[in-house]
């Protein structure tokens, strides 16, 4: 120990205060463990400070402004004057409220909070360097540890993020003036969610995607609906083109792209948002000292009890690789805490949902028909178009569908894909069905409130059984 160092001891050391880390800390505190949580930057991590929450605030506000201006068919004629500075201040207020809440929840569970950057020294000791020069450091002796250090944006060669011309998602979520034009590199989760939001606010948006289509992995029909709507909003897609570099062009940036066939193109925009993926942050806490070597993709390998190769050390959240989703991190954090406390908790990956907050939204959980077949099931599929949902029509949002997949013989629900308004909420019912081992008849036989979007989930289940009332049965 360095002379003058403070030294403390803890049963469970949690490194990182994002969804994975704070969930682990709070749950471990509830279970009576003596817990220390170390956070280098801001409690709540990426999710609360520069990810899920800020992006959903921007998406909601931009959607509201756009809806107000496009409601003539409902007899509403209005103009929305958006003050982006005011919008960002509102978003920041939500972030402050939630991050403050994380601190209070941790403290209420008896979690000891330390601000600083933690690095392992050996299998039972970590050193925490407090932020700022001359702030000193302290040693923490621990019995068990949870690594929850999260992820960071993948850097795209030739596009150094400067927060001015070239932005990452954090910069884009704090812009105080709307760019006239925006070139978005990457048509994944972030690219599609934020390009939709900026287009609704009135920016001229071009999305450059290296692959043949945006939102890889979500299925052609779902993706096509979202892309068509985005095009209606004025977004221009350049698919099958990889961004190669950029140069100043007067007051704009000129982005150069190359197609698979070697053809080059260029697009000019006031700002460029780079969103080409995120990578695990497995290099922030000296994992070598506990004998953990990240795998080739930079993530930490874990088993279904969140255990790593190092005895007594767990890893949760984005640092363990895909899926890099906050709700997966929460669940893993909870399991890590319970296992550390000696409980027989395990992860179950069958029912981890995912949602894209585009217009319309996409929600998925479990298996699609192809996946079900690959796993040896004989799948039956039921579908309900949103256009047949009375509630969807009253919302002016009739595009999309609910598709539910079950095992033909037993009726056990295996998965669903939902495209439509509030798909991110609707998917929860199917997640619960999978989790409980429910059958189609359980969903179809549950009386849903009329008129709601959730009726479409029950109707899709009935459709798979051949008993739907509002849509032709297969
Ligand atoms: P993080 O939230 O990244 O937290 C890790 C924390 O560890 C950070 O606070 C960091 O400062 C700290 N840390 C790192 N190293 C150290 C160290 N050595 N010592 C101390 N502290 C350290 N997911 C969804 O499910 N839904 C969404 O809608 C969604 N939207 C998103 C939108 C955007 C723009 C982005 C960027 C991400 C979004 N995500 C979304 C992903 C989500 O934010 C992450 O999956 C989630 O934050 C992962 O949680 P985590 O705890 O693993 O890591
Ligand atoms: P992503 O992996 O979803 O998409 C990146 C896209 O960039 C891919 O489609 C890829 O083909 C494309 N790309 C890569 N290099 C390119 C190039 N040179 N030119 C053009 N296109 C290129 O990554 P993301 O959008 O940055 O999001 C990162 C992660 O954040 C996601 O994987 C997800 O885990 C999380 N996230 C989740 C949500 C949500 O749950 N709703 C929202 C936002 C972010």
Image (tube, rainbow, N blue to C red):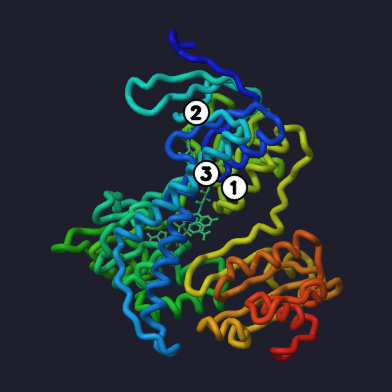
Asked which secondary structure carries label 2, the reply is: strand
Asked which secondary structure carries label 3, the reply is: helix
Q: Is residue 165 left or right of residue 46?
A: left
Some atom of ligand 1 lies within 8 Å of the CB belonging to the residue at label 3: no
Q: Which residue is drawn at 74% across and 67% down?
A: 414
List x then y, in percent, for residue 50: 42, 50
* Res 404 quadrant in image: bottom right
Q: Residue at x 63, y 71 (%)?
A: 417
Residue 448 vertical position relative to residue 4 in the rendered view, above or below: below
Q: Which tag is nearer the camera, tag 3 or tag 2?
A: 3
Q: Is residue 269 visible in this depiction of the protein?
A: yes
- Answer whether labels 1 and 3 touch (C-beta < 8 Å): no
Q: Residue 329 carries which label?
A: 1
Q: Could you say which is closer to the camera, residue 409 or residue 316? A: 316
Q: In this view, does 362 lie to the left or right of 169?
A: right
Asked which secondary structure carries label 1, the reply is: helix
List x then y, in percent, for residue 258: 33, 66
Q: Residue 195 carries which label?
A: none
Pointer 3: what residue? 101
Pointer 2: what residue? 114
Of mark 1 and mark 2, the one earlier in the sequence is 2
Residue 274 vertical position relative to residue 294 in the rendered view, above or below: below
Residue 450 vertical position relative to residue 30 in the rendered view, above or below: below
List x then y, in percent, for residue 157: 33, 51
Q: Could you say which is closer to the camera, residue 86 or residue 247? A: 86
Q: Which residue is drawn at 34% across and 20% down?
A: 134
Some atom of ligand 1 lies within 8 Å of the CB belonging to the residue at label 1: yes
Marks 1 and 2 sit apart, C-alpha to C-alpha, by 21 Å
Q: Which tag is nearer the camera, tag 1 or tag 2?
A: 2
Marks 3 and 2 sit apart, C-alpha to C-alpha, by 16 Å
């Amino acid at each position: 120990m360095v002379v003058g160092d403070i030294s403390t001891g803890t049963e469970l050391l949690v490194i990182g205060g994002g969804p994975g880390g704070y969930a682990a800390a709070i749950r471990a505190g509830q279970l009576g463990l003596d817990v220390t949580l170390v956070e280098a930057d801001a409690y709540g991590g990426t999710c609360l400070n520069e990810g899920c929450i800020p992006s959903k605030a921007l998406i909601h506000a931009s959607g509201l402004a756009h809806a107000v201006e496009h409601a003539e068919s409902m007899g509403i004629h209005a103009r929305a004057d958006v003050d982006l500075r005011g919008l960002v201040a509102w978003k920041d207020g939500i972030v402050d409220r939630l991050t403050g809440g994380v601190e209070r929840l941790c403290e209420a569970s008896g979690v000891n909070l330390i601000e600083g950057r933690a690095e392992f020294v050996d299998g039972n000791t970590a050193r925490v360097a407090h932020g700022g020069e001359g702030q000193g450091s302290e040693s923490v002796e621990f019995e068990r540890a949870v690594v929850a250090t999260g992820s960071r944006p993948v850097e795209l060669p030739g596009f150094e993020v400067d927060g001015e011309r070239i932005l990452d998602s954090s910069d884009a979520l704090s812009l105080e003036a709307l760019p006239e034009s925006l070139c978005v590199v990457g048509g994944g989760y972030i690219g599609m969610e934020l390009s939709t939001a900026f287009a609704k606010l009135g920016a001229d948006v071009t999305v450059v995607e290296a692959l043949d289509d945006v939102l890889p992995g979500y299925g052609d029909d779902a993706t096509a609906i979202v892309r068509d709507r985005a095009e209606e909003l004025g977004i221009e897609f350049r698919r099958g083109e990889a961004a190669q570099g950029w140069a100043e062009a007067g007051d704009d940036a000129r982005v150069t792209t190359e197609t698979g066939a070697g053809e080059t193109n260029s697009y000019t925009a006031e700002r460029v948002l780079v969103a080409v993926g995120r990578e695990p942050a497995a290099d922030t806490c000296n994992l070598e000292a506990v004998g953990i070597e990240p795998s080739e993709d930079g993530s930490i390998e874990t088993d279904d009890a969140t255990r790593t190769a190092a005895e007594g050390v767990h890893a949760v959240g984005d640092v363990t690789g895909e899926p890099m989703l906050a709700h997966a991190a929460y669940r893993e954090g909870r399991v890590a805490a319970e296992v550390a406390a000696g409980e027989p908790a395990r992860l179950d990956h069958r029912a981890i949902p995912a949602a894209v907050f585009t217009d319309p939204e996409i929600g998925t959980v479990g298996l699609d028909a192809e996946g079900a077949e690959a796993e040896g099931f004989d799948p039956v599929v039921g579908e309900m178009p949103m256009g047949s949902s009375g509630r969807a029509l009253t919302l002016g949002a009739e595009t999309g569908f609910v598709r539910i997949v079950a095992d033909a013989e037993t009726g056990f629900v295996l998965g669903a894909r939902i495209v439509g308004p509030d798909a991110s909420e609707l998917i929860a019912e199917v997640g619960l069905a999978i989790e409980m081992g429910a059958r189609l008849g359980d969903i179809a036989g549950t009386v849903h409130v009329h008129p709601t979007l959730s009726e479409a989930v029950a109707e899709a289940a009935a459709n798979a059984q051949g008993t739907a009332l509002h849509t032709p049965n297969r």
